[in-house]
Image (tube, rainbow, N blue to C red):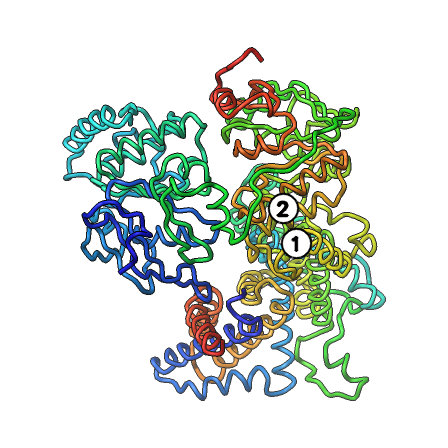
Amino acid sequence: MQKLPKWADVVLIPVINLLLAFLISGLVILAIGKDPVVAIKTMVQGSFGDTRAWGYTLYYATNFMFTGLAVAVAFHARMFNIGGEGQATLGGLGVALVALSIDWPHWALALPAAMIGGAVFGAAWAFIPAYLQAKRGSHVVITTIMFNYISASLLGYLLVNVLKEKGNMAAETPSFPPGASLPTFSEMLEPLGIAFNKNAPANVSFLIAVLACYLVWVLIWRTRLGFAIRAYGHSETAARYAGISPTKIIIVSMLISGALAGLMAINNVMGESERLILNSVEGAGFIGIAVALMGRSHPLGVFLASLLFGFLYQGGAELALWESIPRELVVVIQALVILFTGALDNMVRAPVEKLFLSFRRRAA
Amino acid sequence: MQDVTDTGRQETAAPAIELRGISKAFGPVQANKDISISVARGAIHGIVGENGAGKSTLMSILYGFYKADAGEIYIGGQKTPIPDSQAAIRAGIGMVHQHFKLVENFTVLENVVLGAEDGARLRPSLAKARKLLTELAREYELNVDPDALIENLSVGHQQRVEILKALYRQADILILDEPTGVLTPAEADHLFRILRNLRNEGKTIILITHKLREIMNVTDTVSVMRRGEMKGTIRTKDTSPEDLAERMVGRKVLLRVDKTPCKPAAKVLEVENLQVTDEKGVERLRGISLEVRAGEILGIAGVSGNGQSELLEVLGGFQTASGSIRLNGQEIDLTGRHSDGQSRRESGIAHVPEDRQSEGLIMDFTAWENIAFGYHNDQKYNKNSLLMDNAAIRTDTEAKMERFDVRPPNPWLQAKNFSGGNQQKIVLAREIERNPDLLLVGQPTRGVDIGAIEFIHQQIVALRDQGKAILLVSVELEEILSLSDRIAVMFDGQIMGERLPDDTDEKELGLLMAGMNGKAA
């Protein structure tokens, strides 16, 4: 019945896609007169070579897990939420307001409160496009991308006019109280006797992100709501026949999606910069789209794709730093990966399917 | 060469079409296996077979949509490769698709000329087409107003435009794919008259249909296909519907439903003055009143698009309406506030929707997910207030699949991988085993193979015999006549009249379906 065995679909094809992307990237690097072997070594070394490298890779991966999950959940309801950037920006605002609200005695209290703050703000930012889609038919792709711009302007206004400390030249909030500082990997692993680089930004949020992956899996494949979301995503007419309300599914799935994107702020705002700055999301909302596409909207896929993009991000930064390969080229490599794993999927799929069929026929 | 006696060839001239050894595989599926047929010039040739027997594939090869893996096509004795549909048109083949390919906001004339213009200027082509249309109308009863917009034409007339398009392109061979699916019996009769006229003028016609009665009625020869293979070609006058059905399925088939007289009991469903207006402001239901009693099947006949779908949607809870519906004496909300598929199910209405592929099933879901679909809030499918009990659903699915003989009985298979009949069995298993007070059934056997039709009809009658009320909507008059205990005919959102199946016939129902009141209702 199925054209491909599952393992080929889930593992083989993405790996071939990746190799192709890297192959072309290598050619591009060659074209600008650099050595691709040195480049890939630098990238791998820079992202997995030591605990500092791991600390950065996992830090980026944490961001992408949240935004990737956000896109994935909406995608199961056939909603294309490309507003992760804006929702994560607003999530940052929520996290900052919570963190600055009182002098937190301990991070274990501050974290849950900040999570609520980030999730609520992110969800609220997603609610407006969701409502407009459900009630007025305004397409979320259009509205969420507009909301990305609005969020950037809104945050700029708030930081400059409301949240900035008097006398500070930079548009940023004051630093969060020490009680709201999240434990880094180094602090978490020290009691276990494992040495981890002290400056690496990876923190306890990574564990929250992994937990979020699991919870999203439970939501989508084990709960009635997930069942209804998937049903609506596959067929609206069938969902209506079954008595599943499209309005409810659109709004609820977008709220969950926005909350997940908003949660990202516990990593970058609370865990890393420990204050709210302009453009703290740094495009992670958009990377989330690529992550969800590559991970086929499955939490495990999102987890793996996040690690890959964490590697590309961190390795790319190293490449720019040490090999005088321009930063733009790193973006080219990321774009190639997105192109091959997302858009050109069928290019590899068709021949692989044919290959499998011919094997099967010979075996039969 | 093929043995000539079997092909029903009557003339000495080369056959209009001859296919030799056509094979076509889609991946592991062999859609056509070494198929050879020959159709005499000036004959109406029927091709019958169950869904998936390979009829459409064969015709698509002939019309250049698919390329055959092996085999040859001869047109008028000449070997003719047909790589695309342009080549088919050049070879004199015209095709009338099941779903018309017309531009809605163009006139008849413009549609006929479209794609076959003589030059950059439109006017000469249009004039030529107008002249031809007048001739054709006179010769073959193919009359259509050349200046009418397609969107204003009835389905029957639209079909004539499709035929005219083919004739304008000088087709000698006309292929019609399930042409009567959307026609009233009167329109179908008219179509058959046109086809006979065309045949008498020397055109060759290939008719693909699953309606055996039409085959008997109009064709000269008929080929039967089963599972991608040609099971022989016979002269129509030498066969019977029972014989054809047996050849199609490979075993004896009961065409008529065996059922005991009905014993209607208490009123289950009472519908009064139901009205629906769609978003465009068109009245879809214009005051429908009917009732269904326990232990009876009320059949709703009518050409599709006359409000039957809206009636089912209102009863099924996903369309708002004004008027009143009572179930077992209890008023049901129609405004949409407390009215959805969920609340209808809770009140005891089960619904086998008209379109199982877009409504009744989620094609990408597995069989077990589809068994829970619509009932996913049910207690027995849930562990607690949060988590579903997937294992329980799968156990239940296995049991249901066995009782309804769903093949293959694999709960993990996606709905799209089942045949039409087995998909329908999944929907029926889900809805019937709810033990509903009222079962709504729309087009229960559309796209379902003959073997499964028998089973599905038996299940519906069995539910009636348990004393349940059943509302059956079908565009197949035969099905309505053989299943119903009472028949209501719908036309233009109204009920034209009610008849008892024993006191009426297809002719009278056909008149009602066309909006003409035969007797006083």
Vertical order, A34 against B262 (above or below): below
Vertical order, B439 against B500 (above or below): below
Image side of residue A169 versus residue B463, left or right: left
Q: Judging from the image, what secondary structure is the residue with disc 1 in?
A: loop
The residue where tag 2 is placed is B455
Q: Position of residue A55 (x, y in %)?
A: 65, 79
Vertical order, B460 against B401 (above or below): above
The outermost residue toward the top is B520
Q: Quadrant of the N terminus of chain B?
A: bottom left
Tell which of B175 and A101 is nearer to you. B175
Image side of residue A59 versus residue B176, left or right: right
Check whether the beta carbons of the residues at disc 2 and disc 1 lie within 8 A of each other.
Answer: yes
Q: Position of residue A16 (x, y in %)?
A: 47, 76
Tell which of A37 and B334 is nearer to you. B334
Vertical order, A201 against A161 (above or below): below
* Quarter location, residue A93: bottom right
The residue where tag 1 is placed is B405
Q: Amino acid at mark 2?
A: Phe
Q: Judging from the image, what secondary structure is the residue with disc 2 in?
A: helix
Tell which of A119 and B170 is nearer to you. B170
Q: Chain of mark 2?
A: B
Q: Quadrant of the C terminus of chain B?
A: top right
- Kindly indicate whether the residues beneath marks 2 and 1 are on one polypeptide chain: yes
Q: Amino acid at mark 1?
A: Asp
Q: Chain of mark 1?
A: B
Tell which of A178 and B295 is nearer to you. B295
